[in-house]
Image: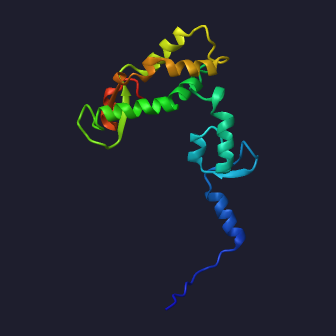
Amino acid sequence: MKIKLTGQKRSDEFKQQMREINQTGKHIKCEVCGKSKYFPINKIKRNQHYFCSHKCRSKGISLYYIGENASNWIDGRTDLIYTIRGCLKYSDWHAKVLKRDKYICQDCGDRGNNLEVHHTKPFRKTFKEFINFYSSFSINNDKDILKKLANKWNDFWDINNGITYCLDCHSENDTYRYV
């Protein structure tokens, strides 16, 4: 059974005029390719860079948010910190702490769900001591040497400097964590 709809048909011109009236955003050029794209007003307030597609966004991130353009960039230290925290030895340290604590939160006793490893001595303090000890090397010019030295810096890899927490307990116990 078909239901027949009755009512006035709107012209394409009228529909286009209504679309333009109801738009609350504006057309902005993509900062990578220059193509114009409509953005609602709530997106315009929130973003400072505008991209027309995921592909352009990926390119734009490398232009605007990585390295010296990143908001938390500090004279090259950021790259070195991410390199240390992303290396295989750091993953091993993380796994050893979890295994030692038997995959149990050391605060509430929760087992196996959303577990994280917390540095009892903050990583940033250990990193600062490392950089001060090797102050004769430049963070910007001697990164490869500092990466190799970091692999031998025992304070980074001491499993006694780690404790297993669940996500909730980690948020409560970590004074440096951004919640």
Specify whether 19 is left or right of 98: right
Pinpoint residue 39: horizontal percent, then vertical percent. Answer: 63, 50
- Place residue 114 in its image quadrant: top left
Question: In the rendered image of this protein, does residue 175 appear above or below residue 23?
Answer: above
Residue at (59%, 47%) from the top-left corner? 41
Between residue 80 and residue 101, name the one nearer to us: 101
Question: In the rendered image of this protein, does residue 8 appear above or below residue 97?
Answer: below
Residue at the left extreme? 109
Residue at (64%, 28%) from the top-left corner? 67
Between residue 90 and residue 119, name the one nearer to us: 90
Residue 134, can we see it?
Answer: yes
Specify whether 56 is left or right of 126: right
Between residue 90 and residue 2, name the one nearer to us: 90
| Badge count | 0
Residue at the bottom extreme? 1
Pinpoint residue 8: horizontal percent, then vertical percent. Answer: 61, 79
- Place residue 46 in its image quadrant: top right
Residue at the front extreme? 152
In the rendered image, which quarter contains the C terminus?
Answer: top left
Question: In the rendered image of this protein, does residue 31 appear above or below residue 6?
Answer: above
Pinpoint residue 117: horizontal percent, then vertical percent. Answer: 37, 31
Residue 26, can we see it?
Answer: no
Pinpoint residue 68: horizontal percent, then vertical percent. Answer: 65, 26
How does the figure colour the protein chain or chains? rainbow
